[in-house]
Image (tube, rainbow, N blue to C red):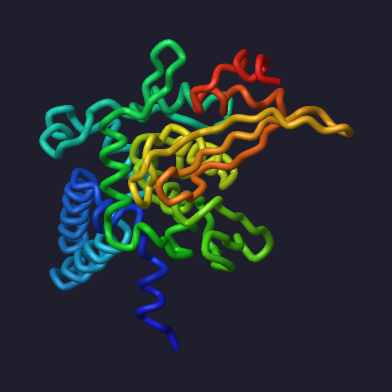
Amino acid sequence: MIDAPDALSRLEQPEYTGENRCRPCTVVNVAIALALAVVIGGAGSALAGAIALGAFLTIIALRGYLIPGTPTLTRRYLPERVLEAFGKSPASGPTIETLTPAELTRVLTAAGVATDRGGAVRLTSAFRARWNERLSSDGAADPDAAAVGSALGVDEVERVGDASFELEGRRRVRWESTAALAADVAAATELRSRLDGWDALGADERRDALTGLRLLRADCPVCGGPISSTVDRLEHCCRQPRVAVRATCEACDRPVVDLVASESNAEPWLELAGVPETHLEAEG
C-alpha cells in the first residue's frame, strides 16, 4: 500500500519552497501549468484539463517549479524589468562546473558574495545580511539531516552526533561545532540562488566553499560574538610542514573554522583568513 504522506515528502524540495521559493519561477511555472491544462482540456475533456492543472499545481507547491531547470532559466531569460519587479538581480551569477579552494575568491567575488580590494577579501553587506536572516529563522541553529543533505547535495543522510553525519551509509563528515554546521546550511541555501552549477557540485566542493565563507565571517553565526582567527605553521619530523587555520568565537568559545592544509595548498585559505603568506613565512 502506498504511503501518501511519505510519497509527497519525497517530492518536496525545501531548497525551492517556503521562504526559499522564487516568485518569478513560481509565476512562470503556474502560467505554463495553465497553458498545458488548456491544451489537455481542449484535446480531451474539461475534467482531464482540471485534473492535470491540479496535478501541475501540486508539483509546483511541493517542488517549487514544474519545468526542470527553471531557477537558472528564469534568471537567464526573463526580462530585467520583470526580475526587478520581484526584487531579483537581473545579472546571473557565475556558472561553475567544478570548484577548488584556489578558485574560491574569484568565484565568490563574481557572485557578489565577497569583495576583493587589494587582497582584503570581505563579505558583501547584502550577502552578509541574507546569511544572517537565514541563520535567525526557525530551526536554523540546529539543522536536521534533511537540511544537511540539501546543503551537501546528498540524498541519504543520518545524524550520528551533534555536528556529525553519515552520508549515504558509508562516509562520515563532522563540523567543528553546531555553529559551523548552522552557518554552512544557511549559506548553502543562499549560494544556490547565486551560483549556476551549485547543484552539480560534489559534497567536498560545497564544503570547501562553505568553509571559505566561514573564514570571512567577523561574528559568530550563533551568538553574534566577535571571531578571532589564528594561523600556525606546524612542523613535523617525518612530513612536510602544514598550516593550521582556526577561527573561534571570543564570546562563546565555539570553533567556527578549524582546518589544516599542506603548506603548498594553504594560500587560498590564508587569503580568505586575511593572513599574507609572507607573514606566515616570517613567523615560521
Direction from residue 69 to residue 172 in the image, left or right: right
What residue is shown at x 43% (from left), y 38% (from top)? 227
Q: Where is residue 128 in the image (x, y as percent from the top left)?
A: 31, 36
Does any portion of residue 202 appear in the rendered image? yes
Front-most of residues 67 and 120? 120
Front-most of residues 160 and 150? 160
What residue is shown at x 13% (from left), y 69% (from top)? 46
Reply above or below: 165 against 5: above
Direction from residue 99 to residue 52 in the image, left or right: left
The quarter of the displayed image where residue 87 is located: top left
The quarter of the displayed image where residue 123 is located: top left
Q: Position of residue 208 (x, y in %)?
A: 55, 38
Which residue is farthest bottom? 1
Front-most of residues 137 and 198? 137
Does any portion of residue 66 appear in the rendered image? no
Reply above or below: 266 against 195: above
The quarter of the displayed image where residue 8 is located: bottom left
Q: Position of residue 271 (x, y in %)?
A: 53, 22
Direction from residue 255 to residue 193 in the image, left or right: left
Which residue is farthest front? 251
Reply above or below: 15 against 192: below
Q: Position of residue 198 (x, y in %)?
A: 45, 40
